[in-house]
Image (cartoon, rainbow, N blue to C red):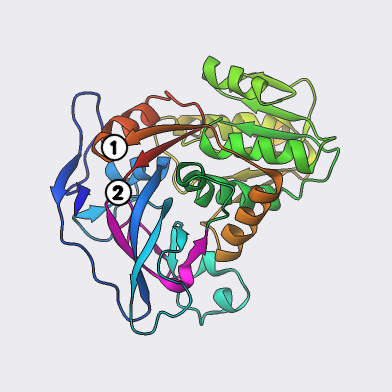
Amino acid sequence: MKAMLLNRPSRLKENYFPLERADFPEPLPGENEILIKVSACGVCHTELDEIEGRIPPSQLPIILGHQVVGEVVSAGSQAKKMRLGARVGVAWINSTCGECKFCLAGNENLCAQFKATGRDVNGGYAEYMTVPEDFCYPIPPVFSDAEAAPLLCAGAIGYHSLKLTGLKNGASLGLTGFGASAHLVLMMVKQRFPDSGVYVFSRSPGERAFARQLGAEWAGDIGDEAPEKLSSMIDTTPAWKPVVEALRNLEAGGRLVVNAIHKEDVDKDHLLHLDYSSHLWMEKEIKSVANVTRSDVREFLELAAELQLRPEIQEFPLAEANQALVELKTRRIRGAKVLRIA
């Protein structure tokens, strides 16, 4: 099968592409697994962290990709739930122990044995992949394959983050960064919380214009001050400056949810300017996001179908995965980027 392989971590540059096109053996499903013929795979900022060594894969070479849509073409001897020909999706969560206190409480995203698609096992930058059948999801027919792919991570993690804010209708929400996840959160809030204003902070003029087009109450630069103090905020950036600036824009008792697996060190000096009285005092909260649960993915797919949430997408053939990643790194973003596989 055709695949794009990461053989070693390296810096992603305009003139150096780290993923290599390769003929790779087609995988065979284990007894509780299904084999998927991949049709589309979303491109995520987490893949930049894997490529550049900030979140090293647990094995090399590795096939990246964790927003996968495809067709079930075969199954292991104990895999009985998904029929052949079914259209299914695969998300970041690939497996957990199922037995620890977190798994038993429904917080499997916190499991110490959490395995991630495209980091601990091969993912969807390929023509075929396997997955435990308990960790895949039927795709609502209202979505095309390319539309569904970003829903499996950008959408699901945005949904999880929004739940963590505890947002109520009429309360204000801030979003720092405006890529694949944030633009879906904005769409969701506009329908579920129609009396809530959404305020977007982005260093990109194009992203700010896109946010206004989708109905943002206001859009400004990362360092700008919002017209009003905000009830809660979601940070979707890989940097530290937006975290500090977000705290400054929170009202008393407000909550900042940091939706990032990793923060880059390039601007960590901004943390030295964290001032207790202006950034943290008055019972402001900071909460991190760790992965997603299967229930997050299932619930969000149902909600997205109900609300007709269609992500803005840019499509690339599999062979141009490196180009899609370079554009993601250099903030040439409008919505979500998706690879067409088959």
Closer to the camera, 337 or 247?
A: 337
Question: Which residue is labeled 2 in the image?
Answer: 125
Residue 136 on the magenta segment: yes
Residue 82 % position (x, y): 46, 72
In the picture shown, does residue 177 fall above or below 112? above
Classify mark 2: helix, strand or loop. loop
Judge left or right: residue 17 versus residue 192: left
**Amino acid carrying mark 1 in the image:** Ala
Residue visible at 59% across and 68% down in the picture: 107
**Residue occupying image coordinates x 70% and y 25%:** 216
Q: Position of residue 140 (x, y in %)?
A: 58, 55
Q: Residue 248 at what x, y percent from top left?
A: 69, 30
Q: Secondary structure at mark 1?
A: helix
- In the picture, the disc for residue 321 is 1
Residue stretch rendered in magenta on the structure: 112-138
Other residues around mark 1 within 10 Å, as few (<14) / some (14–19) / many (≥20): many
The answer to whether 83 appears left or right of 281 in the picture is: left
Q: Residue at x 41, y 39 (%)?
A: 338
